[in-house]
Amino acid sequence: MKEKRTIQVTSGTAAGPTHLAAFDAALLEAGIANTNLIKLSSVIPTKSRVVIGKPTINFEKDFGSKLYVVLADKRESERGREAWAGLGWVQAKDGKGLFVEQHGSQQAEVMRLIKDTLEEMIKNRHESFGPIQYQVVGAYCERQPVCALVAAVYAVEGWGLL
């Protein structure tokens, strides 16, 4: 029997002088900076297990590598406002499943969007899925732009020899 693949869900929040600087700092906090993000749609392959935790990326060896992710992020620059991002997922017993990525200005809003979206997606499929799982993070904008992000990391891949 083939071993299960691990998909790691990581998150980060940060502030910076610009939206992009805040995004970069949040990537650093999440442990996925210095890679080229390749966004995936939201399907979890069979024989997968989803765990929450920072991925083990070797920033020397993997610098500039391709990183396959499902990504939710929200950036905010207006003082007094919040940025929230989250992933939700469901899985069947064989490991296959679905991710959804959502963002908004309040935690409750993001969690409701995740729940509503996954419930509708489940209705359209014949599989029996377990309970909805969540990873949601937020940041409050005080002085500088902020970014909140959650990523499901599937795999890191080098570019090979040219």
Image (cartoon, rainbow, N blue to C red):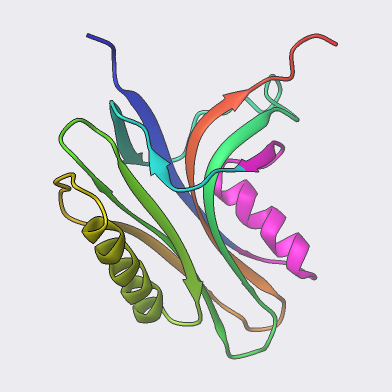
Residue at 34%, 71% (x, y): give it.
111
What residue range appears in magenta? 14-38
Out of 122 and 90, give the one closest to the viewer.
122
Confirm whether residue 158 shows in the render.
Answer: yes
Q: Is 69 within the magenta?
A: no
Whole-percent x, y for residue 17 in the image: 79, 70
**Location of the C terminus (image quadrant):** top right
Whether residue 53 appears in this view of the structure is: no
Residue farthest toward the right in the current orientation of the protein: 162
Residue 115, image quadrant: bottom left
Against 52, residue 93 (above or below) is above
Report the residue at 80% width, 9% height from top.
161
Q: 7 left or right of 38? A: left
User: Measuring 24% from the left and 56% from the top, which residue is drawn there?
Assistant: 122
Going by the image, does 109 lie left or right of 69?
left
Q: Position of residue 59 (x, y in %)?
A: 67, 28
Q: Residue at x 36, y 32 (%)?
A: 45
Count how many numbered circles sit on residues in the image: 0
Q: Is residue 114 left or right of residue 124?
A: right
Q: Position of residue 68 (x, y in %)?
A: 57, 36
Position above or below: 80 against 66: below
Q: Quadrant of the N terminus?
A: top left
Residue 24 within the magenta-colored segment of the rendering: yes
- Can you give x and y, in whole percent of width and height, for residue 160 in the image? 74, 12
Left or right: where 25 falls relative to 116 = right
Foreground: 83 or 60? 83
